[in-house]
Amino acid sequence: MKSINPYVGPRDRMVLEQLAARGVSDPRVLDAMRHVAREAFVPEELRQAAYSDQPLPIGEGQTISQPYIVAAMAEALGLRGDENILEIGTGSGYDAAVLAHIARAVHTIERIPSLARRARETLRRLGYESVEVIEGDGSVGWRPAAPYDAIVATAEAPRIPPSLRAQLRPGGRLVMPVADPSCGQALVRMIRGDNGHDRVESILPVRFVPLIGIEGWPDDRTSSGQTREGEGLHRPFGGHR
Ligand code: SAM
């Protein structure tokens, strides 16, 4: 007898109710979100909550991003399918799997060794051969696979790291959260110009963990200079929930 996957229904509902209903419309992104088994990237005891509308803890004080944020960031990259992508902040590896469904190659870098190892194992087990997981400080990018058509970071920096801009090809897109005086943190998109004239726009207010590294925040600080509440979580606010 054919067994029924109990996660397919919740996953389809997540795509309709959390993504499409909030305006995510790129068919490639919706298709990828419909295919990636988010339950495989969360701790076993949280599998039942895998398709809930929130980030979830993955250990080491870090989180797997809320599905809507993963989809909104992928959509903002404007992918067509042939891209070489750099992701900073592998975490569980879920985001990398979503991007791998759409793009040609994904290089993803994580600073916490135990998370990098677990994500690598999960991605290998699920057959994501086009994803390379690197352990290290992604605030300075990953030169061996540059230039990139698209760069995405899932941790907040004080400003767009110059190394990430340098590793983006002209016309390429970078999407990441950066500190913003008006709302705390904003998701920004930068399109690298041919002649040094980049286009930078704010997409939505967000709450991400800090990007810790040479071109990010120092290890002992927080972006506001105060202790963050709910560190390890990120979620859109002000009309995006
Ligand atoms: N994309 C992830 C997923 O799908 O599960 C969610 C990532 S979590 C919100 C942010 C991650 O960024 C954390 O795992 C954190 O350790 C990592 N991080 C923070 N600073 C980093 C840096 N300089 N280089 C690489 N990873 C970093």
Image (cartoon, helix red, strand yellow):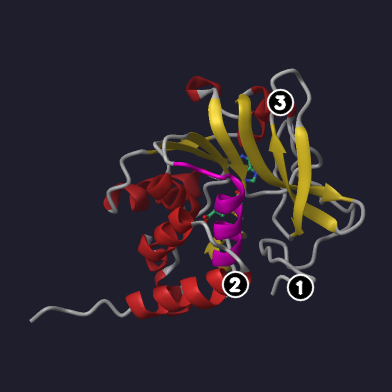
The chief SS type of the magenta part is helix
Does 19 sit above or below residue 194? below
Residue linked to disc 3: 193
- Residue 209 falls within the magenta-colored stretch: no
Q: In which quarter of the image is residue 62?
A: bottom right
Q: What residue type is labelled 1?
A: Gly
Point out the tag, 3 or 1, that comes first from the N-terminus.
3
Residues at discs 3 and 2 in contact (Cβ within 8 Å): no
Image quadrant assignment for residue 11:
bottom left
Label 1 or label 2, whichever lies nearer to me, is 1
Q: Which amino acid does label 2 sit on?
A: Gln
The tag on residue 54 is 2
In three-dimensional space, the C-alpha distance between marks 3 and 1, rounded to whole angstroms, equals 31 Å
The amino acid pointed to by label 3 is Gly
The residue identified by callout 1 is 239
Residue numbers of the magenta segment: 67-80
In space, the residues marked 1 and 2 are separated at their CA atoms by 15 Å
